[in-house]
Amino acid sequence: MFPRKSVLFHSSTMLFGAAIASVLATDPLLAADVLFGPQPGAALSVEKLSPIEDFINGEVAAGRIPGAVVLVQRHGQPVYFKCFGKRDVDAGTPVTPDTIFPIHSVTKTITSVAAMMLVDQGKISLSDPVSKYISSFANMKVGVERKDESGRSMLDLVPLRRPINVEDLLLQTSGITYGFYGDGLVKAAYDGIYLGDFDNAGFAERIAKVPLAEQPRTLWDYGHSTDILGRVIEVASGQSLYQFEKTNLLDPLGMTTTKFFLTDPAERARYAQPLARDRHVERNSLDVTRWESGGGGMVSTISDFARYGQMLLNGGTLDGKTFLSPATFAAMTTDHVGPGAGVARNYYYYPGDGFGFGYGFGIRTDPGITVPPPPGSFGEVKWDGATGVYLVVDRAEDMFFVVMQDSPSGRMHVNTTVKKIIYDAFEK
């Protein structure tokens, strides 16, 4: 079920460690920031991972989550793997290694990898205007809210200073937002955007009719950028988003259960159900529609994510297959929105304190302002989804871990606690 250790894995990790050592040697001030996590290559105590079991079993027993599965993999081998609780509390069926979870926004990372594969193939350029692939995006405007003479809020539609490009979609800096958090007239313009049955082409046309929340590359604004990236992939490849990903990424990786919809009754029976109080998400993966949401529509299993996580840990390769060139992988895992980038952050900057953002992933850049710093390592790569699927890739420690759950209300406490236990297990 889990990929074996590879020579490429070790060589890429050694190069990453050498890069860190070079930074520390040439910039002592930065060294103080970098050395907030475990020392590169520190021993990991499997015994000290055992509190994960007591903690998650306690969350299940208290009725805060239905169940979960946790994998910690280091040096190409699983060092901790365990299933907890129920995948369906009402039916009493347990979480098993083949349980299928909705991954929601972790889908964004897969879509971003697929897009960068097309960059490697020369079919997409990061500087391409989105209107090259979706003509209606040539007419986008920014909605600037103001008060009229009576004090009523209104929108002025302002021309773009420059077109939205593919890189903006990857960075969540396109000005395309979500309508389900925050307030204001632009947010309100998203009301009803999910109604009816539509495909990626149709959804892109819906987004093209909504004003942008701000000028491109001025604010990290979490939204439907990656859904639009999915449509760009379709136009550039001549395939549906899923068919391109299945042919070029998922099948070659062995991710056979990662898909947008479950139509096989046997697979549907393995789907993880949330607790009753959490059955309020906009999109149910058991509903088969035409929309292949590149921003949040996929489902997967822990065995598939063992393959995916190892590929990322290896720097874009697995089992002798190259999915991303070294330069492309480096670009994906570099912060592009940090100081000097001109990209502002607000309350909804979801990468969090101490993190920048690359192409589809949060990137740990510094300890942050919390004392002591939250657990992790310089350069760690991460993302998570609305129901609690959480992927962290730590190349400095030869490790990645995955938490899978379907727990919108309980996910944050689970993920932060599991991460702390894992990093506390490194020998000091």
Image (tube, rainbow, N blue to C red):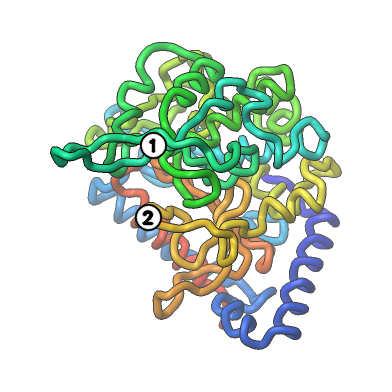
**Residue sticking out furthest to the bottom:** 28
Q: Secondary structure at mark 2?
A: helix
Q: Position of 7 compared to 151: left or right?
A: right
* Tag 2 residue: 414
Residue at image location 33% in from the left, 29% down from the top: 189
Image depth: mark 2 or mark 1 in front: 1
Residue 20: image location, x then y, percent:
72, 74
Determine whether 245 is above or below 113 in the image: above
- Badge 2: residue crowd in 10 Å (few <14, some 14–19, many ≥20): many
- Badge 1: residue crowd in 10 Å (few <14, some 14–19, many ≥20): many
Determine whether 339 is above or below 69 in the image: below
Residue 348: image location, x then y, percent:
38, 52
Q: How many marks?
A: 2
Q: Mark 2 to mark 1: distance in Å?
A: 38 Å
Q: Amino acid at mark 2?
A: Val
Residue 182: image location, x then y, percent:
30, 44
Residue at image location 42% in from the left, 20% down from the top: 286
Q: Nearer the viewer, residue 172 or 333?
A: 172
Residue 33: image location, x then y, percent:
57, 80
Question: Within the image, what quadrant is residue 146 found in?
Answer: top left
Q: Looking at the figure, which quarter contains the C terminus? A: bottom right
Q: Secondary structure at mark 1?
A: strand
Q: Nearer the viewer, residue 175 or 91?
A: 175
Question: Within the image, what quadrant is residue 307 found in?
Answer: top right
* Tag 1 residue: 143
Q: Amino acid at mark 1?
A: Gly
